[in-house]
Image (spheres, rainbow, N blue to C red):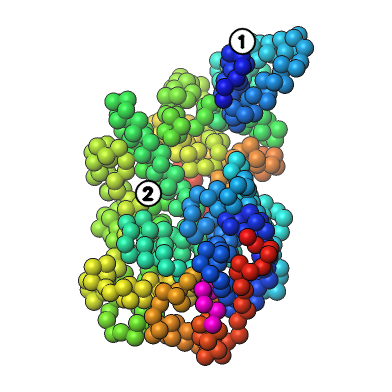
Amino acid sequence: MELPSKHITEAVEQLATLPGIGRKTALRLALHLLKQNKDEVERFAGSFINMRNKIQFCRSCHNISDNEICSICNNPKRNKKFICVVEDMRDVIAIENTRQFFGIYHVLGGIISPVDGIGPSDLNIDSLVEKVQKGEVNEIVLALSTTMEGDTTNYYLFKRLKEFNISISTIARGVAVGDDLEYTDELTLGKSILNRIPYENSFVKS
Amino acid sequence: MFLKKISLFNFKNYSEAQFDFSEDINCFSGNNGVGKTNLLDAIHYLSFCKSYFNSTDYLNIRHGSDFFILQGDFVNESKEETIYCSASINQRKIFKKNKKEYSRLSEHIGLFPSVVISPEDTNLIHEGSRARRKFLDSVISQFNKTYLENLINYNKALEQRDALLKNFAESGKFDLSSLLIWNKPLIENGDEIYQKRKEFLKIFIPVFQKYFKIISGGAEPVSLDYQSGLNQNSLQTLLDETIIADRNAQRTTSGIHKDDLIFKLGGHPLKTIGSQGQQKSFIIAMKLAQFECIKEIKKFCPILLLDDIFDKLDHNRINSLMNLVSTHHFGQIFITNTEEKKIREIFKKIKIDLKLFKIGENKNET
Ligand SMILES: [Zn+2]
């Protein structure tokens, strides 16, 4: 696609780096922005810079946070010795909506998937193991998506954590295989967390 | 179960077409290239969520368009079910039953099973083991949903493990523990797949041998030998033993994705010893056995799709096949044929009514 301005080319190329945006759509978006007032565009672009600069990841659980420690980890009513391991922020929101969980989270930032170039060292796994090593944890519930990759990540975590004297469980499988946590309705998810099963027993095929 | 009606929109060479079918035998006649086989393939697509011939969905879109739509009205125990399918160049394909979209295609597979007999099936004999595994998998998947789940998960785990082996080779770093975690899903699903394949073949082989005898009229013994590394060792042992080989090959070299079926005629490989006629009989017997096994398990007849076989088979084989059709209960059948006269004669002889569609003469198709 030959464009009449190198500035447009640059903008199109940047927009096209977003997931699900092809060059055609990127051009449409760029032309749309060109029609806007200058300060409107400035506010638009500024919001991303602001977001990226000001948002931090909680030092304790790696969830997105406005402060060094997020509001969940900072809440004195939450049980810091009970950790729910999830893939990303969307899972935290889903589980918080159930109002059934009063521990804290640990956000891995993804699941192990060599196809996508993601190995254990690309995820927030070492910091979880460290926490456990220091004796800061009594119980861990693994709440990763019930896909084959989610299961395998659970298995990896279990292997890393089993030598410590803590109880490890997974959420009960009311959820069909292949469904992501995000799409599970709140009731089932809440139930799943209450009826969590010890990890070793979860091997038994239903 | 039968297909009452089908509508095609931009599917292969059809811009727009509609057909009302007979519950028994339907025949599509017309010259080569008018789209008889494409119509059969549309029926297969509704049954199996994919084409029998093109594994890439967009290749089924009519030239110059960017999407196709298929809709089929099936009747199942006097209940009507509408299956809708659309696929486009840019978006994922959509499958709906009674206007409700399936969350996964595997929910659909097996609801309206079908069996195809086509001249292309000789690839089962001549191509690599992949074609034969695909045959086995597609048959078992039609009546066993967990098998299909196992297969999908096994293939995903395999893809991940292979990607990891490739990463190791490229980065020069090897980490055994992150490789071994993929053995778990491979073993969990692979063991199940192996057991199911073995159990299925136990039932399938005698039925196949029965049909081969009927069609060929011959007394020569035929067999299908299931070849799998798991016949001798557990998958755990195999994976442990091939770690070095896997690292060198940069992919997983043992497992049920290496299984094969060995076709034998009189104790020798069919591929080298069988005549063309014997090879065709072999394949048709396999397909008829597939039909019977699905029928036994599902307690209803799958749809039978016969592509071009009257043109390609000799007189004797057609006769024995037609005797089968007339004496056994086969449910709904679709047949493609170039010569209308020939097909009318065959069916007159066995006293079965058929509904004839002349493809390429209606103006509702191109
Ligand atoms: Zn936190």
Q: Which of the 4 quarters of the picture holds residue A32?
A: top right
Estimate the x, y position of residue A57 in percent, counting from the top left: 58, 16
Q: Which residue is mark 2?
A: B187
Q: Nearer the viewer, residue B43 or A80?
A: B43
Residue at mark 2: chain: B
Tell me the element at label 2.
Answer: helix
Estimate the x, y position of residue B116 in percent, counting from the top left: 49, 68
| Residue drawn at (63%, 54%) of the image | B10
Is residue B275 toward the left or the right of residue B288 in the image?
left
The quarter of the image holding the N terminus of chain B is bottom right
Asked if badge 1 and badge 2 are on a common chain, one would say no
| Circle on res. B20 | none
Q: Nearer the viewer, residue A153 or B269?
A: B269
Is residue B258 toward the left or the right of residue B15 in the image?
left
Distance between the alpha carbons at the discs numbered 1 and 2: 45 Å
Residue at mark 1: chain: A
B226 vs B295: above or below: above
The image shows a total of numbered marks equal to 2
Question: In the image, is residue B229 part of the stretch drawn in magenta?
Answer: no
Local packing at callout 2 (Cα closer than 10 Å; few below 14, some 14-19, many 20+) is some
Q: Amino acid at mark 2?
A: Ile
B114 vs A13: above or below: below
Is residue B147 toward the left or the right of residue B178 in the image?
right
Q: Is residue A43 visible?
A: no
| Residues shaded magenta | B335-341
A50 vs B199: above or below: above
Question: In the image, is residue B338 part of the stretch drawn in magenta?
Answer: yes
| Circle on res. A53 | 1
| Residue drawn at (51%, 73%) of the image | B338
Q: Which of the 4 quarters of the picture holds residue A8?
A: top right
Q: Amino acid at mark 1?
A: Asn
Q: Is residue B353 visible?
A: yes
